[in-house]
Image: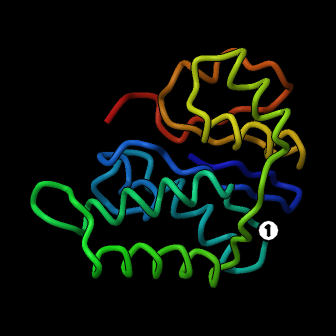
């Protein structure tokens, strides 16, 4: 899931499900990976500013740590280092870790059927007057704030 704006602002909000992690890294196996990859390339090229919501950085971190950990999805010292490296890689490629307004995050969570991290992304998108790029999830159909939505995928994985 991404937040972006053609006028030079991008905020990235990763998806909270392990099976969708590949979309974050734009692997070929994920439907919608082309759009995700294009957005990441635009950020890395400096065409647009990019932000990663802190709550979503935490999600990427724990998902990578589990995915790269043991066979039963438990993190290891090595997998936690891999997760740290992935977050640093996103930062080196132009993303700035940012925090959405706590009140706007709370209002978005209270009003809708989205995760707290998704609500943080909504708040950040609203603050930056950006477009929220999301997966196939109807939780974004009705939000308490005005945020444009683009779906990088219209069907579940």
Say which quarter of the image contains residue 148.
Answer: top right
x, y (%) of residue 124? 79, 46
x, y (%) of residue 20? 36, 46
Residue closest to the far left = 71
Look at 75% across and 58% down and name the residue there.
Answer: 10
Q: Is residue 156 above or below residue 8?
A: above
Look at 48% across and 45% down and name the residue there.
Answer: 15
Say which quarter of the image contains residue 151.
Answer: top right
Look at 64% across and 78% down and name the residue there.
Answer: 91
User: Along the line of sight, which residue is nearer the eye, 71 or 152?
Assistant: 71
The image's colouring method is rainbow
User: Along the line of sight, which residue is nearer the eye, 152 or 51?
Assistant: 51
x, y (%) of residue 42? 68, 70
Look at 36% across and 30% down and name the residue there.
Answer: 156
Q: Secondary structure at mark 1?
A: loop
x, y (%) of residue 116? 61, 35
Crowd class of label 1 (few under 14; some 14 to 19; many from 20; radius 10 Å): many
Q: Is residue 107 left or right of residue 92?
A: right
Residue topped by disc 1: 48
Q: Is residue 99 above or below residue 135?
A: below
The quadrant of the picture occupied by the C terminus is: top left
- Count of numbered marks: 1
Say which quarter of the image contains residue 83.
Answer: bottom left
User: Along the line of sight, which residue is nearer the eye, 114 or 29?
Assistant: 114
């Amino acid at each position: 899931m991404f937040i972006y704006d053609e006028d030079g602002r991008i905020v990235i909000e990763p998806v909270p499900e392990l099976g969708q992690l590949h979309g974050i890294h734009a692997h070929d196996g994920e439907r919608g990976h082309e759009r995700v990859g294009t957005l990441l390339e635009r950020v890395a090229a400096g065409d647009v500013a990019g932000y990663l919501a802190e709550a979503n950085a935490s999600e990427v971190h724990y998902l990578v740590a589990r995915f790269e950990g043991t066979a039963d999805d438990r993190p290891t010292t090595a997998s936690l280092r891999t997760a740290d490296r992935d977050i640093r890689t996103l930062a080196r490629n132009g993303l700035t870790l940012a925090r959405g307004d706590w009140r706007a995050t709370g209002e978005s969570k209270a009003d809708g059927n989205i995760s707290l991290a998704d609500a943080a992304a909504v708040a950040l998108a609203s603050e930056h007057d950006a477009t929220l790029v999301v997966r196939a999830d109807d939780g974004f159909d009705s939000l308490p704030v005005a945020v444009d939505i683009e779906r990088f995928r219209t069907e579940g994985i």
